[in-house]
Image: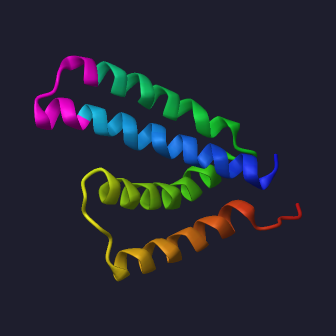
Amino acid sequence: MNLVKSLLFFVITGLAEIGGGYLVWLWLREGKSFKYAIVGWLILMLYGVLPTFQPTNFGRVYSAYGGAFVFFSLLWGWKIDKIPPDAYDWLGVIIILIGASIMMYAPRHY
């Protein structure tokens, strides 16, 4: 699997997890219709399937995805909740993404 395809799966997985969770949040916290919960749960099930398409083991994929989740959560909060990240948020996410990239894409010879 090439790098671009793997990164695309991280993006789609991030949108599924955060989007599905957000719909459940709206149902429980904002009093939206139960339909929001149903759609959210379906999207979250998709989130459970998507990481299986990554080219490495479960532990590495989910560890690296943790970095992607932090990044997508920051963007979601900025664009959807209108809470802009500050310099420390950006610094933290850069450090996290560097670590996640090393874990996921470092050349291994075994």
Note whether 50 is above or below 92 in the view shown: above
The residue range painted magenta reads: 25-36
Q: Residue 41 lies in what quarter of the image?
A: top left
Looking at the image, residue 3 sits to the left or right of residue 88; the answer is right
> x, y percentage for residue 12?
56, 41
Q: Residue at x 24, y 53 (%)?
A: 81
- Can residue 58 be seen in the rendering of this structure? no
Note whether 98 is above or below 78 in the view shown: below
Camera-nearest residue between 7 and 50? 7
Looking at the image, residue 72 sits to the left or right of residue 65; the answer is left
The main secondary structure of the magenta stretch is helix
Q: Residue at x 37, y 61 (%)?
A: 74
> x, y percentage for residue 50?
59, 35
Looking at the image, residue 57 sits to the left or right of residue 108; the answer is left
Q: Residue 85 lies in what quarter of the image?
A: bottom left
Residue 100 is one of the magenta-drawn residues: no
- Can residue 25 be seen in the rendering of this structure? yes
> x, y percentage for residue 4?
74, 52
> x, y percentage for residue 95?
51, 77
Note whether 72 is above or below 30 in the view shown: below
